Image: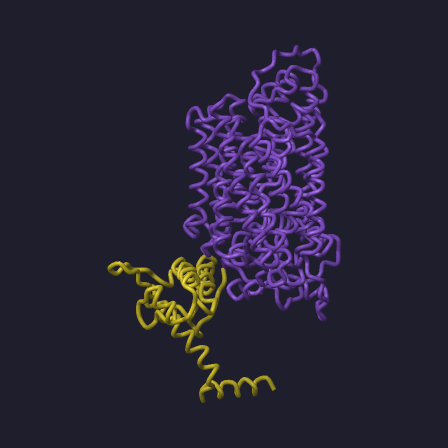
Chain colours: A yellow, B purple
Amino acid sequence: MKTGRAHPGEEIRLDEESAEQLADAMYALSTPSRVQILGCLLKGACSVGDLVRDLGMEQSAVSHQLRVLREHRLVKAEPVGRRRLYAIYDDHVTELLRAGLRHVEERKRPSANSSKRRLAARDHRS
Amino acid sequence: MRFAPSADRRSVLDRAHRGDVVGAAGRVLAVDTAPRPSRRRQVATLLAVMGPGVVVMVADNDAGGIATYAQVGQNDGLRLVWLLVVLAGILFVNQEMVARLGAVTGAGHARLISERFGRRWGAFALGDLIVVNLLVLITEFIGIAFGLGYFGVSRYVSVPLAALALITVSGTGSFRSWERAMYTLVAVSFVAVPLLVLAGHHNPAVAPIPAAPHGPVPGTVLLVVALIGTTVAPWQLFFQQSNVVDKRITARWLSYERVDTAVGTVLFTGGAVAILAACAFAFSGTPFHGAFVNAGTVASALRQRAGGWAGALFAVALVDGSILGASAVTLSTSYAIGDVRGTRHSLHRRWGDARTFHGSYAACVVASAAGVLIPGAPLGVVTIGVQVLAGVLLPSALIFLLLLCNDRTVLGPWVNPRWLNTVAGAVVAGLLALSALLTLTTLFPHVALGWATVLSAATSAAMLGAVVGRRIGQPDIVVSGQTPPDRQFWTMPAIETLPPPSRSRSRTVGLIVLRVYLMVAVTVLVARLAQLIAGS
């Protein structure tokens, strides 16, 4: 049993199984090409062909990564007519991606807020 | 505890392949890569890491193996026992290479073939593996049926029960429980020792019983190739590499994994020699000599020659080896499927958590069990024929192995040293020559091949292979900074990011020629097998 503290006063208890599942979901996000595919899907459902065109990856590679994403329930496949469209699994995944993107964008372009935080950290260390 | 900088850096294809080593007899934390200064720590680490090598080697004494050793012992006495010792050496060389590939790359053999030689070769290797494994699995169930049949258990009871047990053991979601179950089976396999003692002291007063009817007794050359086919099997390469990955053994623990493989090799040799010698002692100078039919008749013949205990011990060894072999063979299929498709494939995962992995495992087990239960199936012929088939398919897997072990992109500082290439080249070429001889004798059954021909062909091929192997390896590049601690933590970059391999024309042509040869060989074998079945 691991215990993590999200906000002061609010406690999230993560049992081993939930931790494993979360780690699995994060593993699926641990390859840049898969993240790129998810980024494309944020705009709306796509077919494999669309993804191949947008990302310039090989079709077999796209199919392979889609299979991994589907197994981790980050992406779902829907037959539309004769085509098969791939879409983000649900709102949680969208949220997760957006939050992750904000997390790295913030580091890339230090906003007033975060530089203030870094200064505070430096003060604290010295 | 020192926190190593790159303890967890190896790329994996399933998240469950990353983390602590949780073995049957111990645990090594993923962050604990500190040196082991004391003998006690070294032993504790070895106990935790030990497993894949012991399991793969002892599982080699499976239904097909035991039947072949018994056949060789019964028909030829102790004449071929030296071959087992040579084979043990060959096995160790091969298995050390796959264990190294697994620990350093974090990917299975099928996936590496598919990434480095193209999807088509990968699919071909995977297809080969699935077909051969299904046939081998049938032989394991035949072994179970024969073994438990000795105790009067109907095969309609024993085979479904064994299938259920196999599926249950791998579906617990705990690598440790699976490995403990395998260790239990390894422990039971030691019954071969008392069997040898009993057979050595058999009661000469027991009247010899008239010989059992002769089954199809293949010639000695066919028997030798069958012995090699059953001992050096393709599933072993795929199994140990994936099992090392699944056990989360990294390059840091490779020296321990080598010891594991060596211990396994010793156990394998002991078990195989004990069974061969037991049959040789019990049957020499009796009407049973030269009258091998199948493993079931060996058990009852042993009872007549050396008493009820000997027959029972042989039956137990047969059932035990068959279950151990069945688990490892089926897992090698499931690992390879998940590995190539990129879906979850780990014994750390429960049933619902890795559906393709456990589903394909269950499908293979159920299909082969059903195959055995079909009435009138010629079971004894299948046992030997399958091993011959595997012996023919093996060379391709070995050639891929040799090329992968010289691929600096894949293995970095862990590529084969030149002396090992020489040895491995000789091994591969020798096995290729034996396969060719087998095809020849099958095509032209009237050509009587003497021992001299076989030995000289295998030896000259091995020498040629050694010369070729010496040239395969690139000259050892001494990279500054490649000090031993760095080597311990060198891992292959993520498999998707590997640069394409440098394509040499000779390599591609060689591989095509090899495949065509293998296809022809397999076709001829199947035809010959069908002829045998129809004729008997």
Q: Nearer the viewer, residue A114 or B191?
A: B191
Which residue does the image show at 43% across and 32% down from the upper left? B371
Residue B203 locus on image (x, y percent): 70, 15
Quarter-of-image position of residue B295: top right
As drawn, A111 above or below B103: below
Which residue does the image show at 45% across and 65% down from the upper left? A26
As drawn, B376 above or below B482: above
Q: Is residue B395 left or right of residue B426?
A: left
Give the residue furthest to the left.
A81
Looking at the rendered image, the quarter that the N terminus of chain B falls into is: bottom right
Residue B297 locus on image (x, y percent): 57, 21
Q: Is residue B531 left or right of residue B199?
A: left
As drawn, B165 above or below B239: above
Which residue does the image show at 62% across and 34% down from the upper left? B225
- The answer to whether residue B196 of the structure is visible from this angle is yes
- What is the number of callouts on the image? 0
Residue B26 locus on image (x, y percent): 62, 50
Q: Nearer the viewer, residue B209 or A123?
A: B209
- The answer to whether residue B320 of the structure is visible from this angle is no
Give the residue furthest to the right.
B38
Residue A121 locus on image (x, y percent): 54, 84
Q: Nearer the viewer, residue B8 or B174?
A: B8
As drawn, B286 above or below B258: above
